[in-house]
Image: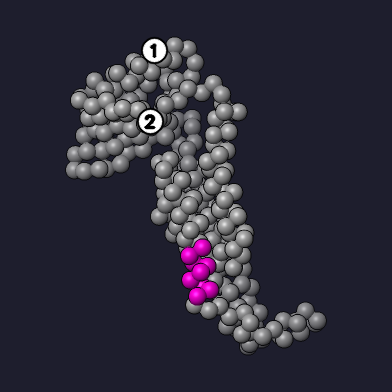
């Protein structure tokens, strides 16, 4: 009874959200999605900047709406749960994250992007609740996890990996993807993170990663790259930030 009495004596006006406060929370959510989304966009992941921004904004809007409903009905003796709507976001965003998970042979890709979408939704809820310290500090830690810890993972957990990131332009995606797999078998390397983007009517950009493992690495890299450059479907190809090999 004491708890109920305490709730009834709350001044509803003290809980109201002004227009500026709502805009500030939405702006905070947009910054969260922007920072995390740019990192995912830069690494050519399935969900990029706009997707992360929309997830953060949507989660923030849901949390704000929950608080507004609570404030609206509190004077009438009702005590709706302001966190109920946001709880559905945490579980529902899993369906969106599942769309970024892909299976390539024995490898599963997109788990980190799915996790980043879920984390962005949670941070958006924090921003919508007005917990700016949680939202902004969480963004810093998530961004650090996606960048700094990725480098540490390569150095500490996989020190013998010899991977190269390639970016090529082609007018025949299907033929180019086929030649990549053929040359990968010849060079005994593993192809990962393939992404194709449509640039123009007859021009496509294909980015992928090739892991050469151990043994005659330099020779196999040269063979792989040379055969791709010579293929008719290849307009140009480059390795990371190295010079472009074009016809």
Residue 173 percent across, percent down from the top left: 26, 34
- Main SS class of the magenta portion in the image: helix
Secondary structure of the residue carrying numbered label 1: helix
- Residue 219's tag is 1
Q: CA distance from mark 2 to mark 1?
A: 18 Å
Residue drawn at x 54%, y 71% is: 64
| Residue 55 in view | no
x, y (%) of residue 32?
Answer: 51, 56
Q: Which residues are magenta?
A: 20-28
Mark on residue 240?
2
Crowding at label 2, few (<14), some or many (≥20) Cα neighbours within 10 Å?
few
Q: Residue at x 54, y 47 (%)?
A: 143
- In front: mark 2 or mark 1? 2
Q: Quadrant of the C terminus?
A: top left
User: Mark 2 or mark 1, which has the lower sequence index?
Assistant: 1
Report the residue at 58% width, 59% height from top.
Answer: 135
Residue 215 coordinates in the image, percent (x, y): 47, 12
Left or right: 154 in relation to 240 = right
In this view of the protein, can residue 220 be seen by the observer?
yes
Q: Is residue 204 magenta?
A: no
């Amino acid at each position: 009874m004491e708890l109920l009495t305490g709730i009834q004596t709350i001044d509803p006006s003290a809980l109201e959200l002004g227009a500026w406060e709502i805009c500030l929370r939405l702006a905070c959510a947009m910054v969260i999605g922007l920072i995390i989304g740019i990192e995912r966009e830069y690494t050519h992941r399935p969900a990029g900047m706009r997707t992360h921004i929309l997830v953060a904004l949507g989660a923030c809007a849901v949390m704000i709406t929950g608080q507004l409903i609570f404030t609206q009905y509190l004077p009438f003796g009702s005590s709706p749960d302001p966190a109920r709507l946001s709880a559905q976001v945490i579980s529902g965003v899993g369906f969106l994250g599942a769309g970024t998970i892909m299976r390539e042979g024995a490898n599963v890709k997109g788990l980190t992007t799915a996790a980043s979408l879920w984390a962005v939704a949670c941070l958006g809820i924090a921003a919508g609740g007005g917990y700016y310290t949680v939202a902004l500090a969480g963004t810093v830690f998530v961004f650090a996890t996606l960048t700094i810890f990725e480098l540490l993972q390569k150095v500490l957990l996989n020190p013998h990996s010899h991977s190269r990131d390639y970016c090529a332009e082609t007018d025949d995606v299907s033929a180019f993807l086929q030649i990549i797999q053929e040359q990968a078998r010849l060079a005994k390397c593993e192809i990962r993170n393939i992404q194709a983007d449509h640039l123009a009517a007859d021009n496509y950009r294909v980015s992928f990663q090739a892991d050469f493992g151990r043994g005659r690495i330099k020779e196999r890299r040269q063979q792989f790259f040379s055969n791709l450059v010579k293929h008719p479907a290849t307009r140009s190809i480059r390795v990371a930030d190295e010079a472009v090999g074009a016809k």
